[in-house]
Image: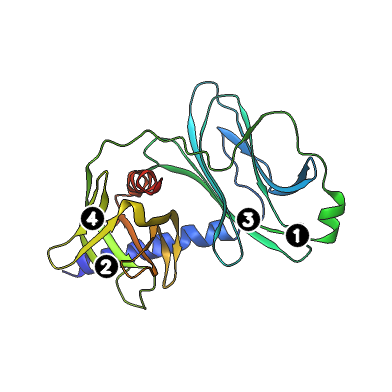
Amino acid sequence: MLHTLLRPVALVVVSLVAIASAAAQEAPPKSNYYELDKVHLAKRNNTYVLVHTITSTTSKDRFWALVEVNNTDGSRKCEWLKVLEPKQRYHFECPVDATAGQKYPSRVRVYSNAKLTNRELFYEPVLDITADRLSGAAESNSTGTVVPDGTFEAGEPTLPTTFKPTWYRRVDKGFGMRAYENSGDLTVTSDEVLFVDGKKTVRIPRNEILSVRWEPLPNDIANHWVVVRFKTEEGKEDGVAFRDGGRIGLRGETGPIYQALHYAGKK
């Protein structure tokens, strides 16, 4: 009994350690398979751009990079899901406001498989726009491939598809001992997103989805969630979140949920 009770606690402790380590990084983590340059400010013609550069150093392995640039209020600025081919160099360039004092947090994840279940890297820098950075910004490096903003290289899912067990919570969920509010079945169809747990049913028409993001949420610093923001029948904006709940949240297969919901969110 005691062992069973301790398992969710262990999950939180392990996750907290991993996130604290990532947040404390001042430089990109090292890898035997790819190189990350430190995030920097550059110019592309007459536009200032925040630049992440990833170079594959492996001769045969493919990796998947999920790169996000945010505004300080948490809203999305730029986003990519890109396959990293062997021995290739990629630039992820996000146009930014060239005003000293602006800050742009980023999240970079690199995975070793297409399901995004085995994360090899986590990097969370914040780029401060300063007068020195603006005056020192050079033309962005021309060697390598510039990945267009919005690139999402994931296979089209077979719909309908169901994920279970899936954790559910409201974005504005208050504090609680559990990270989730309900655990049930999440089904994505060509028309809607449907979550059912026997007591609660959440139905989101596909054409009412405003955005799909993979992000941390308030009152849960241990987990990242796939957040679906949408319009209600009353025309108000709302948001709910999902993540894989298998093995008490330890299975780690939230990636396929993200890909299916991201596809559903495309108009």
Q: Nearer the viewer, mark 1 or mark 3?
A: 1
The local secondary structure at tag 2 comes to helix
Q: Nearer the viewer, mark 3 or mark 4?
A: 4
Give the crowd class for mark 1: few <14, some 14-19, many >=20 residues within 10 Å: many
Say if 150 sits above or below 215 in the image: above
Disc 3: which residue: 125
Asked if residue 49 shows in the view, the reply is yes
Give the crowd class for mark 4: few <14, some 14-19, many >=20 residues within 10 Å: some
Q: Earlier in the sequence, mark 2 or mark 1?
A: 2
Disc 2: which residue: 6
Q: Earlier in the sequence, mark 4 or mark 1?
A: 1
Q: Amino acid at mark 2?
A: Leu
The local secondary structure at tag 1 comes to loop
Q: Is residue 30 left or right of residue 234?
A: right
Q: Which mark is residue 194?
A: 4
Residue at the far bottom in the pictured view: 175
Asked if residue 248 shows in the view, the reply is no
Q: Earlier in the sequence, mark 3 or mark 4?
A: 3
Q: Nearer the viewer, mark 4 or mark 1?
A: 4
Q: x, y (%) of residue 178? A: 29, 71
Q: Amino acid at mark 3?
A: Pro
Disc 1: which residue: 129
Q: CA distance from mark 2 to mark 3?
A: 33 Å
